[in-house]
Amino acid sequence: MDLTLLSEAFIALFLVISGIFGLVGSFGLVKLRETMQRLHAPTKATTLGVGGVLIASMLYFLLVKGSLSFHELLITLFLFLTAPITAGFIAKTYMLHRVSREDLPSTGRDYGWALYDAAPGKEDDGNDQP
Amino acid sequence: MIAAALTFAFACYGLALLFNLWRIMRGPTSADRILALDTMVINIIALLILYGILRGTAVYYEAAMLVAMVGFVSTIAYSRFVLRGDIIE
């Protein structure tokens, strides 16, 4: 089989898969009912979709253009590092408005939930109360 | 073959952006809006990379990297603002 055709099919496969992943991630944002459920779809599926696009781009420039580039890996690494941090912050934002302090289970430690109490070793100045 | 797959991926991410816009307008809580904006930034990164493949140039990686960084910082800033009423303490 022709090698050019094979590499083109490989790149096209990655592009189609990543497009479907991106679409599923954003469709979950519309379809799911609760905010905490909606947090699942974009943070996982969309990040995977962008990873697929970046792999397809890397393969395209390697196989078709004949130049190797590592920029894509950098972007993928950055996105995979920042996605959980963003999700944690958004969950905290949701908890502040919709979950009351009494409903949360005990942490079982000397310090309470980070959302309401100051960090260990830091004075609670009372500014973090909503 | 690549051209057809590129068109398909462009259509998917364009539709995804429309879904995000709907959630930004609709979203009952501010957490929903922050989440939709963050997803929008990630979809725009994917569109930029796809446009780079379409044009056959490597210029758009830098743009995508910058958009990724600005998007991350703005999402954190928006969340901090809602959480604390203050971005830099």
Image: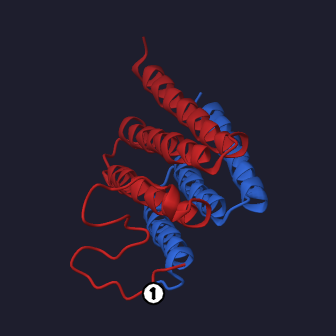
Q: Secondary structure at mark 1?
A: loop
Viewed as shown, does residue B30 lie left or right of B65? Answer: right
Scheme of colours in the image: by chain
Above or below, comparing residue B66 to residue A106 in the picture:
below
Colour that chain A carries in the picture: red
Q: Residue at 52% x, 73% y: name it.
A: B74
Where A1 sits versus A51, above or below? above
Quadrant occupied by the N terminus of chain B: top right
Q: Chain of mark 1?
A: A
Number of numbered tags placed on the structure image: 1
Residue A6 or residue A2, whichever sits in front: A6
Residue A86, image x and y in percent? 46, 60
Query: From where the camera sits, is residue A57 visible?
Result: yes
Residue B67 lies, with reference to residue A122, above or below; the image says above
Residue B19 at x, y = what percent? 73, 48
The image shows residue A13, relative to residue A2, as above or below, that is: below
Closest to the observer: A83 or B71? A83
Residue closer to the observer: A39 or A73 = A39
**Which of the two residues, A72 or A92, is positioned nearer the viewer here?**
A92
Tell me, what hue is chain B? blue
Residue B54 in view, yes or no: no
Residue B26: quadrant of the picture: bottom right
Horizontal placement of A113 versus B13: left or right?
left
Residue at label 1?
Answer: A127
Q: Please, what is the three-letter code of the amino acid marked with disc 1?
A: Asn
Residue at 54% in and 55% down: B42
- Quarter of the image holding residue B69? bottom left
What residue lies at 56% left-to-right and 56% top-to-bottom? B48
The residue positioned 57% from the left and 75% from the top of the image is B82
